[in-house]
Image (cartoon, rainbow, N blue to C red):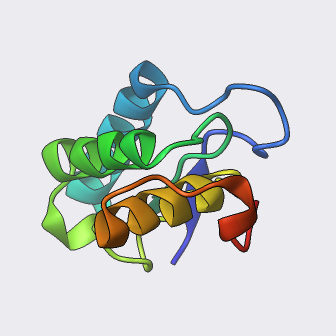
Amino acid sequence: SDFIKTSTGKEGVNATIPVGIVMCRAIRDYWEKTGYKVGFKPAGGIRTAKDACTWLFLIKEELDDSWLNNNYFRIGASGLLTDIERQLFHYTTGRYAATHELAMS
């Protein structure tokens, strides 16, 4: 599918919730008028698993569950991987990992 994205993701902060709301509403309006679904990719400034969850909630609320898959929603956040790894380590062990215990650190 075609995607719109907040930015290249190469700048400090580009993916903000207010911008995401506007973009999601434009996607919804376009879909309602044409019947064609466009994907959304927030990029830039998404660094934590909590940030990613916020974007998931935004998509669910502004669009619907049918956008919650890789055909219509992707997060452009290479910096996010380390935090996800850290959170999974904590979930499975009950403690946060030291840097040397994480492959991506």
Q: Residue at x 71, y 40 (%)?
A: 7
**Residue 15 visible to an observer of this rendering:** yes
**Residue 75 in picture, x, y percent from top left:** 54, 58
Q: Position of residue 4 (x, y in %)?
A: 58, 53
From the viewer's side, name the closer residue of 102 and 84: 102
Using the rendered view, name the quadrant where residue 44 is placed: top right
Give residue 97's quadrant in the image.
bottom right
Task: Name the quadrant of the C terminus.
Answer: bottom right
Q: Residue at x 41, y 26 (%)?
A: 17
Q: Image quarter for residue 90?
A: bottom left
Above or below, 61 relative to 77 = above
Residue 92 vertical placement versus 26 (above, below): below
Q: Nearer the viewer, residue 94 or 47?
A: 94
Question: Residue 77's spot in the image, x, y percent?
Answer: 65, 53
* Figure check: 45 above or below 64: above
Residue 76 visible (yes or no): no
Image label count? 0
> Residue placed farthest to the right in the image?
10
Residue 81 in the figure: left or right of residue 24: right
**Is 14 located above or below residue 27 in the figure?**
above
| Residue 68 pos. (x, y %) | 28, 68
Q: Name the outermost residue toward the top.
A: 18
Image position of 87 (left or right of 2): left
Q: Nearer the viewer, residue 48 or 69?
A: 48
Q: Residue at x 66, y 68 (%)?
A: 101
